[in-house]
Structures are given as structure tokens and as C-alpha cells.
């Protein structure tokens, strides 16, 4: 089999002629530029790439990608993308959604797409606020969050998107940040290579309604001690001088952070994204506090399981092989057949 011919596409080829209409300074601009810069690496013709979104600021994404796309219904992007992926396995299908779109009205669609392991790449922009509708609290807003819809503070406990995805046994789960282009593109690269559902949470700043929500992870003075950069096969240490590490607490559950200098090397957890049991990745997802200390980024889980669309395609092929007539002959027989109902 011959090697695929390089298409020699550039980031410019993936920029549409539409004016980008987000608020100046929005983190979506950085994500858009990173995705457009990454797309040529796929070496996939633009007509074989589809971006599907729901409703929200992030959901304007398909307008700005010079590929096929659909700005669909609030929360329903995973459902529409599932139909496309199942019927057109030749396409690279991407879903762009936000924390409100995906985790509120679209919650069931998201978890079932992940449960089924549909061959989709789902990018969830999490800014912990409703931006398009002007600053109401969202399913990821922290307890006590004061917004236009919660003037004395939110009483809701927020979702942890990664924990939710892992609870649905998503086969690929990752987190990255809008302002770290190198890291963002490395995660996109890993997600694109995954066969099945790839769920990527992207911390994204809304500078109008929730500005500075992730400053702890971005400011040079704090980010090194707050971020845990996961690397497969490497001990999990972090901090400006590697002074912190992650361990399994003796006789306990989950994971915890300790000082590296006081911890024997053999007790430090070596990151393995291929652990089949989601409990390990789930424990990683529970490390951050509300102040974002001890926040892991990178690929939490990447395991293999038959994708929904591949199973469906096999079923269709088996059904066709079981009959002697061609699909055209079967259709002609139905059209020329007698009544298909009986009146009693």
C-alpha cells in the first residue's frame, strides 16, 4: 500500500472568510489559532473534516474553520455528530462546545457519546460562566459564585468535567489551557490520533464575565507550583524546582500531594495514561482544589476499545452479507410489493 500523498496545507488554508466575532481578548481566539495551526498535521483534505457545535460563544467555531461544519442545536452537537460519524467513517468529526452547552442541556448527549465511544473529538471550552447570554453562572461555576443569576452566590456544587467523562468511561480524556499553545496542540495531536471518543477540556478565559478565573495557572509567579504537567511514563513531580510529587496514600484511596524531598522515589506515582481501570485517571481528576492548586494538565487516560461507528459498520456489513439481493433490488422489491398493513 502506497504512502498517502502530503497535501501541503497551511494554517491559512483553514481560515474561513468570515469575520471572527468574539469579544476582544477572549481566549477563544487563541484556541482557534491553535486548531487552525494544527489542522495541516492531520494531512486530511478539508472536505473530509467537519466541525459541529451547539449554542454558545465557543459554538461560533465552525464559521471560522474553512472545512465543513454545522452550528447546530443547544446541547445536541454530540448527538448530531454521532449520526455523522456512524454513517461517514471517512470523515474526521470534531465537536466544539462549552461548559454550559455540554454540561447543562447537553449533559445526556455528552455522556452517552462518551459511553458509546463514538469516533469524535470533543473540545469543551470551560470558562466557568455563561458568556453568550451575558454572565449567568454555569454548571462549572464554583459554589458561592456571584453572577447576574446568583446575586447572593451560587448554591450549586459544580461539575468536574473530567470526572464526569471518566465516569462515563471515556477512552481518551485530557485537559489543557487556551494560553499554552504548545501544550494545547500536543493534546490535540494525541486526541486526533485516538480511535474513539476523545474528550478534551480546555480552560478558557472569558475576560468580560469571568476574567482571571484561571490566573493561578497562568501567572509566572504561581503557575509552576499549581500546574501538574502529566507525561506518560514519567514520575509525577511539579513545582518550580520539582519540590512536590503525587503519591498513593498508604491505607487510603485516591492520590495526594507531598513534598518530593521527604518522599522515597519509589513511592512517587509514575503516570500511565494506558491504565484500563478509569479509577486511576479519576483520582488524578480529583486533585485540584477550588483554588486550582494541584491542577493536572495533559492526557489523563488513553485506552483502546471498539468504537461505536466501527461496530455499527460491521453490523451493517454482516446484514448485507446475509441476503442475496443487492440494496437496490431490496428497495425495488419494497416499492413494488403489496400492502404492508392490514385493516381489521
Image (cartoon, rainbow, N blue to C red):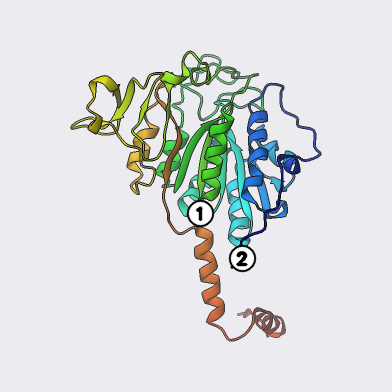
Write the residue at 54% across / 54% down.
Answer: 119
Residue furthest to the left in view is 251
> Tag 1's secondary structure?
loop
Residue bearing mark 1: 195
Write down the quadrant of residue 73 in the picture.
Answer: top right
Viewer-nearest residue: 146 or 92: 92
Viewer-nearest residue: 327 or 231: 231
Q: How many labels sit on residues?
A: 2
Residue bearing mark 2: 2
Q: Indicate the position of residue 167 as horizontal and vertical percent values.
A: 40, 43
Q: Disc 1 to disc 2, how far (Cα)?
A: 22 Å
Q: Quarter holding the N terminus?
A: bottom right
Write down the quadrant of residue 63 in the picture.
Answer: top right
Left or right: residue 195 compared with residue 56: left
Of tags 1 and 2, which is closer to the observer? 2
Q: Is residue 326 above or below residue 277?
A: below
Q: Is residue 20 visible?
A: yes
Q: Indicate the position of residue 207 as horizontal and vertical percent values.
A: 63, 19
Q: Is residue 284 above or below residue 221?
A: below
Q: Indicate the position of residue 202 as horizontal and vertical percent values.
A: 55, 33
Write the residue at 54% across / 36% down.
Answer: 104
Viewer-nearest residue: 339 or 156: 156
> Tag 2's secondary structure?
loop
Amino acid at each position: 500500500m502506497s504512502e498517502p500523498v502530503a497535501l501541503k496545507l497551511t494554517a491559512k488554508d483553514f481560515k474561513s472568510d468570515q469575520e471572527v466575532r468574539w469579544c476582544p481578548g477572549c481566549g477563544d481566539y487563541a484556541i482557534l489559532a491553535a486548531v487552525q495551526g494544527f489542522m495541516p498535521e492531520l494531512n486530511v483534505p478539508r472536505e473530509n473534516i467537519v466541525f459541529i457545535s451547539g449554542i454558545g460563544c465557543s459554538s461560533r467555531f465552525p464559521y471560522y474553520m474553512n472545512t465543513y461544519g454545522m452550528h447546530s442545536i443547544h446541547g445536541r452537537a454530540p448527538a448530531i455528530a454521532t449520526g455523522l460519524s456512524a454513517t461517514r467513517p471517512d470523515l474526521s468529526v470534531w465537536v466544539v462546545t462549552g461548559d454550559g452547552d455540554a454540561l447543562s442541556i447537553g449533559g445526556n448527549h455528552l455522556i452517552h457519546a462518551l459511553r458509546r465511544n463514538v469516533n469524535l473529538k470533543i473540545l469543551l471550552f470551560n470558562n466557568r460562566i455563561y458568556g453568550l447570554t451575558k454572565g449567568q453562572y454555569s454548571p462549572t461555576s464554583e459554589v458561592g459564585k456571584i453572577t447576574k443569576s446568583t446575586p447572593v452566590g451560587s448554591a450549586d456544587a459544580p461539575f468536574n468535567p473530567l470526572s464526569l467523562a471518566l465516569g462515563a468511561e471515556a477512552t481518551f480524556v485530557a485537559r489543557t489551557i487556551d494560553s499554552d499553545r504548545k501544550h494545547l496542540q500536543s493534546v490535540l495531536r494525541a486526541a486526533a490520533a485516538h480511535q474513539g471518543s476523545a474528550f478534551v477540556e480546555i480552560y478558557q478565559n472569558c475576560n468580560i464575565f469571568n476574567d482571571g478565573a484561571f490566573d493561578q495557572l497562568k501567572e509566572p509567579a504561581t503557575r509552576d507550583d499549581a500546574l501538574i504537567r502529566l507525561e506518560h511514563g514519567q514520575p509525577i513531580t511539579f513545582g518550580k524546582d520539582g519540590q512536590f510529587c503525587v503519591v498513593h496514600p498508604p491505607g487510603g484511596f485516591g492520590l495526594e500531594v507531598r513534598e518530593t524531598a521527604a518522599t522515597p522515589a519509589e513511592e512517587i506515582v509514575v503516570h500511565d495514561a494506558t491504565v484500563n481501570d478509569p479509577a486511576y485517571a479519576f483520582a488524578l481528576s480529583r486533585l485540584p482544589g477550588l483554588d486550582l492548586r494541584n491542577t493536572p494538565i495533559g492526557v489523563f487516560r488513553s485506552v483502546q476499545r471498539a468504537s461505536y461507528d466501527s461496530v455499527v459498520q460491521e453490523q451493517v456489513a454482516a446484514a448485507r452479507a446475509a441476503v442475496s439481493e443487492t440494496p437496490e433490488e431490496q428497495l425495488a422489491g419494497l416499492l413494488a410489493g403489496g400492502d404492508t398493513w392490514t385493516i381489521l
